[in-house]
Image (spheres, rainbow, N blue to C red):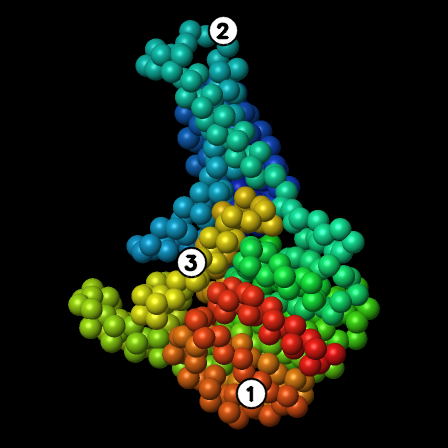
């Protein structure tokens, strides 16, 4: 190592450690993307100029990546863990390290090439690769960096509502979409389903008519969408922090819109948090509305396991059957162990609306390109961080009573793993008002499968509780 190389090595190590501490799951915002490109380019340019060698295109990124991986070794989750041989495992590597590669490693390589050319000025050019090919290749990489940077800094937006409210904002690091025709209308807070849940696209695409009756606030749960960065901050992501997030956003909305109580709508896994929030703080809510209500996740998963195993045997899917038998029934210790259940519930129950929901969120301007790129990883990382803790709740014993009107919207074709525990809890639940609305042609996502009927049902809830 020469003294000329020492400064860029120190700088590459420092930037790698800094990136690992500041943006351990890759650039998540436009500002982080710009800093990543700029700092990486500076390191690369210095490395190329100091070494006067195109080998700096490999050496500088290698030093940076080694420091980055060491700095974030404290974190866990599919996006930062080692490779896993599965469909979701490959996706985690591409999205998790791919975004970092495009916005950090690639700019470093390009800048190192130009730095080396500057440092070698006046020397005879190398002859192994013709000059025009080198220039073309580096120019193409530079164009990729420029296009990726431009895409990364494009802001999210939501269409304006004349005379109403339409905005994207954050509260304590949690992303919110707030939309309504009349700012004096009752506020409705929607808590989406799975860990890492993000539903702004689905709400915009299917539930615009709901904005005529409520100020509709869609929350990205901690770890999902606009709230991905909150996964590693504050209290550990789990049951209690999820409930606390719901209460914090509730109080923000109460103060902002000057309403003593608001409506709380929650779906699937998010409905565990919603039911607990309504049970612990009934004074904050006019009513609780559970959709695809979850009750006891361990029991749900055991039913899913039994149904998928029976389906695999009946349809001759021997590899799936062998995997399930070898693994045994849940609970499991990590996200990837649940992959056979996650990827096969649609085949068993004939409900592929989760995939449709992901498409909705990838095709909406309410999310930035970076937020869309991190969609799968935010779900996987949040699942691994939160799901074990969510399994310690059973509403049949933990929430036997709600002191607010309780409404439930359920598809007639709801998955058995959710429908069976819910039927038991609904029968036991004590509430001042307790009503179940069944959507005849829907499965797990009736608000998006039959949106017109859902809006009518919600209008009736408002009328009943005015």
Q: Can you say which quadrant of the picture contains the C terminus? A: bottom right
The 10 Å Cα crowd at callout 2, few under 14, some 14 to 19, many 20 or more, is few
Instruction: Indicate left or right for 312 with 25 as reference.
Output: left
Marks 1 and 3: which is nearer the front? 3
**Image point (59%, 56%), residue name:** 204
Asked if residue 16 is positioned above or below residue 254 in the image, the reply reads above
Q: Residue tagged by mark 1?
A: 398
The 10 Å Cα crowd at callout 3, few under 14, some 14 to 19, many 20 or more, is few
Q: Residue tagged by mark 3?
A: 355
Task: State the separation of the CA atoms marked 1 and 3.
Answer: 32 Å
Which mark, by number, is residue 258? none
Marks 2 and 3: which is nearer the front? 3
User: In the rendering, at what x and y percent does residue 217 appear?
Assistant: 67, 63
Q: Residue tagged by mark 2?
A: 122
Figure quadrant of residue 346: bottom left
Task: State the separation of the CA atoms marked 1 and 2.
Answer: 77 Å
């Amino acid at each position: 190592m020469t003294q000329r190389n020492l400064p860029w090595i120190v700088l590459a190590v420092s930037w790698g450690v800094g990136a690992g501490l500041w943006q351990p799951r890759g650039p998540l915002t436009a500002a982080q993307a710009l800093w990543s490109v700029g700092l990486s380019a500076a390191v690369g340019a210095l490395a190329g100029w100091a070494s006067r060698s195109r080998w700096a295109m490999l050496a500088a990124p290698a030093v940076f990546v080694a420091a980055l991986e060491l700095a974030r070794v404290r974190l866990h989750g599919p996006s930062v863990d080692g490779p896993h041989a599965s469909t979701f495992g490959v996706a985690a590597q591409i999205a998790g390290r791919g975004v970092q590669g495009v916005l950090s490693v690639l700019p470093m390589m390009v800048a190192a090439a130009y730095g080396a050319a500057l440092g070698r000025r006046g020397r005879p050019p190398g002859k192994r690769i013709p000059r025009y090919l080198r220039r073309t290749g580096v120019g193409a990489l530079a164009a990729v960096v420029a296009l990726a940077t431009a895409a990364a800094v494009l802001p999210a937006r939501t269409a304006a509502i004349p005379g109403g409210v339409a905005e994207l904002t954050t509260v304590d690091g949690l992303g919110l979409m707030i939309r309504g025709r009349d700012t004096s209308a009752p506020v409705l807070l929607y808590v989406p389903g799975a860990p890492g849940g993000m539903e702004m696209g689905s709400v915009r695409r299917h539930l615009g008519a709901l904005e005529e009756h409520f100020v509709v606030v869609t929350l990205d749960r901690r770890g999902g969408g606009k709230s991905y960065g909150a996964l590693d901050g504050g209290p550990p992501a789990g049951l209690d922090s999820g409930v606390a997030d719901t209460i914090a956003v509730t109080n923000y909305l109460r103060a902002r819109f000057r309403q003593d109580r608001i409506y709380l709508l929650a779906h699937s896994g998010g409905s565990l948090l919603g039911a607990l929030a309504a049970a612990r703080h009934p004074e904050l809510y006019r009513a609780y509305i559970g959709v695809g209500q979850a009750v006891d996740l361990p029991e749900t998963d055991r039913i899913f396991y039994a149904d998928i195993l029976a389906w695999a045997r009946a349809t001759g899917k021997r590899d799936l059957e062998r995997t399930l038998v070898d693994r045994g029934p849940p609970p499991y210790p990590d996200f990837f162990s649940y992959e056979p259940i996650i990827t096969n519930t649609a085949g068993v129950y004939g409900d592929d609306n989760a995939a449709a929901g992901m498409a909705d969120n990838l095709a909406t301007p309410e999310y930035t390109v970076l937020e869309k790129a991190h969609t799968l990883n935010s779900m996987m990382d949040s699942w691994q961080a939160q799901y074990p803790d969510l399994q310690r709740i059973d509403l049949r014993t933990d929430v036997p009573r709600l002191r607010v009107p309780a409404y439930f919207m359920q598809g007639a074709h709801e998955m058995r793993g959710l429908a069976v525990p819910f039927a038991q809890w609904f029968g036991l639940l004590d509430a001042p008002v307790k009503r179940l609305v069944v959507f005849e042609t829907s499965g797990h996502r009736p608000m998006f499968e039959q949106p017109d009927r859902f809006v009518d049902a919600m209008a009736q809830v408002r009328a009943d509780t005015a």
